[in-house]
Amino acid sequence: MSGLPDKPKLNRHFRMQWEETQQNHVLLYPEGMIRLNSSAGEILKCCDGTQTIDEIVTTLETKFNTTGLRKDIEAMLTHAFQENWIV
């Protein structure tokens, strides 16, 4: 998890929104659009700059009434950070 921000937030150059026609969340940016799967959308919705990664894990495990999501959430956040989607 090294290098990830303590309280990740969406990079200001991206805007996330629900695309009704595609039935999923997308990240919009000046050069195009990134279609997110449902898990990525749920994780990025939590990246508002107020929650720590621990809090994001707790939020999502509570929301989906499950445990053991940390590894997948951290993997998604690492990918999002490498792609500059979050800061």
Image: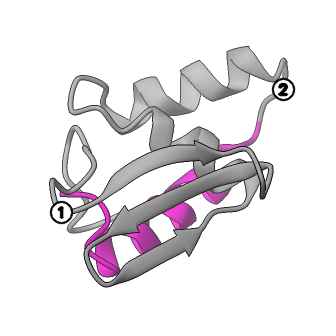
Q: Is residue 63 left or right of residue 87?
A: right
What amino acid is labelled 1 in the image? His
Q: Is residue 40 above or below residue 53?
A: below
Instruction: Give the magenta part as a residue range.
Output: 68-87
Please tell me which residue is depicted at 45% across the width and 32% down the height of the picture.
46
Q: Quadrant of the N terminus?
A: bottom left
Q: Mark 2 highlights which residue?
A: 66
Which picture quadrant has residue 49?
top left
Q: Quadrant of the C terminus?
A: bottom left
Can residue 54 be found in the magenta stretch? no
- Callout 2: helix, strand or loop? loop
Which picture quadrant has residue 60?
top right
What amino acid is labelled 2 in the image? Thr
Can residue 71 be found in the magenta stretch? yes
Residue 13 in percent (x, y) is at 18, 62
Q: Is residue 47 left or right of residue 86?
A: right
Residue 13 badge = 1
Residue 76 badge = none
Residue 53 in percent (x, y) is at 38, 38
Which residue reaches farthest bottom? Answer: 31
Residue 31 in percent (x, y) is at 31, 84
Q: Is residue 39 above or below residue 45?
A: below
Mark before the other along the chain sequence, 1 or 2: 1
Please tell me which residue is depicted at 30% across the width and 31% down the height of the picture.
52
Q: Label 1 vs label 2: CA separation?
A: 33 Å
- Label total for image: 2
